[in-house]
Amino acid sequence: MAATGELIRLMNYVDDIVTTLRRISASIPMMDAEERKRLAEHLRSANLNFSTILGQLEKGEQ
């Protein structure tokens, strides 16, 4: 099955997300407790969107 240009672009976005998460992980030791807390809250809100999209993909929904 050949990948469309749109699929390749979306997969590249996922690769960008993974790269960003690695950068965040590498920065955690240099953060103070308040920064870690704020970043965790921000990531938690992003997780809701991630979970929703993943569910749509798995169910074949739009």
Image (tube, rainbow, N blue to C red):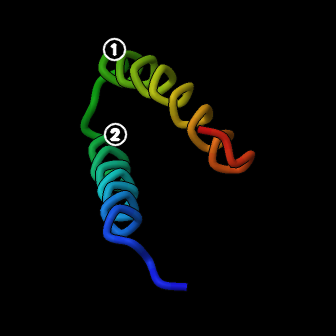
Q: Is residue 22 above or below residue 28?
A: below
For the residue pair 33 and 2, the one nearer the viewer reads as 2
Q: In this rendering, would 44 be left or right of 37?
A: right
Q: Position of residue 7 (x, y in %)?
A: 41, 65
- Distance between the Cα atoms at labels 2 and 1? 11 Å
Q: Amino acid at mark 1?
A: Glu
* Image point (36%, 16%), residue name: 38
Q: Position of residue 19 (x, y in %)?
A: 31, 58
Callout 2: few (<14), some (14-19), or many (20+) C-alpha neighbours within 10 Å?
Answer: few
Q: In this rendering, would 40 be left or right of 32?
A: right
Q: Could you say whether the residue bearing mark 1 is in a helix, strand or loop?
A: helix
Callout 1: few (<14), some (14-19), or many (20+) C-alpha neighbours within 10 Å?
Answer: few
The residue under label 2 is 28
* Image point (30%, 50%), residue name: 20
Snapshot quadrant of residue 15 = bottom left
Q: Position of residue 42 (x, y in %)?
A: 39, 20
Mark number displayed over residue 34:
1
* Image point (27%, 44%), residue name: 27
Q: Is residue 42 above or below residue 61?
A: above
Mark number displayed over residue 7:
none
Q: Position of residue 39 (x, y in %)?
A: 36, 24
Q: Which quadrant is the C terminus positioned in?
A: top right
Q: Could you say whether the residue bearing mark 2 is in a helix, strand or loop?
A: helix
Which numbered disc flags the more N-terminal residue, 2 or 1? 2
* Image point (39%, 72%), residue name: 4
Q: Residue furthest right?
A: 59
Q: Which quadrant is the N terminus positioned in?
A: bottom right
Q: Amino acid at mark 2?
A: Ile
Snapshot quadrant of residue 37 = top left
For the residue pair 2 and 23, the one nearer the viewer reads as 2
Q: Is residue 13 above or below residue 59?
A: below
